[in-house]
Amino acid sequence: MNVDFRFYYPIQVRYGDLDPQWHVNNARFLTYLEQARLAYLIHLGLFDGHSFLDLGLIVADIHIAYRAPIALMEELRVGVKTVHLGNKSLKMVYVIENPATGQIKAQAEVVMVAYDYHSQTSIPLSRHWRETIAAFEGIPAYAEG
């Protein structure tokens, strides 16, 4: 994955993130992606961080490739980038890396669906979200073709 990330979120590895082998449990990697995704949306002004019922996105699909273990006290950051905007979904890519060494710990692709939690249905991705994300990432606001 050769991606230029415009947004990074620092992660502090906690003792509770470790498994019996003394490295970060693979399930925690997903938590790191989630933390970075929320910070990304807040950074773009698309979520205020208050009501998750108003978040407007739900995870539909996750693919993660684990590249190297993460140790306690290791410096980490998560790169987040939206690479595609569909009608009702968007595709995000991530990298978890040690910024001091450049070592990649994991790479991921996540498909998010625009979702109304009140009616529990998928909805079209709003024009505001499209334009905001497209401007930040330098990608088309609408799918071509």
Image: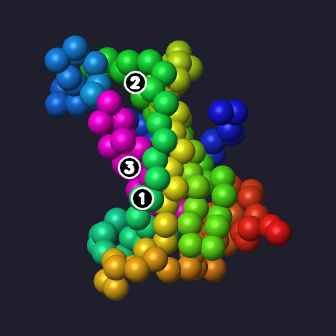
Tell me the distance, in whole angstroms, between the alpha carbons under discs 3 and 2: 18 Å
- Sequence-wise, the earlier of marks 3 and 2 is 3
At label 1, which amino acid type do we have?
Answer: Val
Residue under label 2:
75
| Along the line of sight, the residue nearer the viewer: 50 or 126 | 126
Locate residue 39, reporting x and y percent: 43, 54
Say what secondary structure mark 2 lies in.
strand
Tell me the distance, in whole angstroms, between the alpha carbons under discs 2 and 1: 27 Å
Q: In this view, does 30 lie to the left or right of 122?
A: left
| Residue depicted at x 46% and y 47% | 62
Q: Is residue 67 visible?
A: yes
Segment colored magenta: 26-44
Above or below, 13 against 81 in this view is above
Q: Is residue 65 left or right of residue 128?
A: left
Residue under label 1:
59
Locate residue 24, reporting x and y percent: 29, 25
Above or below, 112 against 122 in this view is above
Residue under label 3:
34
- Sequence-wise, the earlier of marks 1 and 3 is 3
At label 2, which amino acid type do we have?
Answer: Glu
Marks 1/3 in contact by CB < 8 Å: the verdict is no
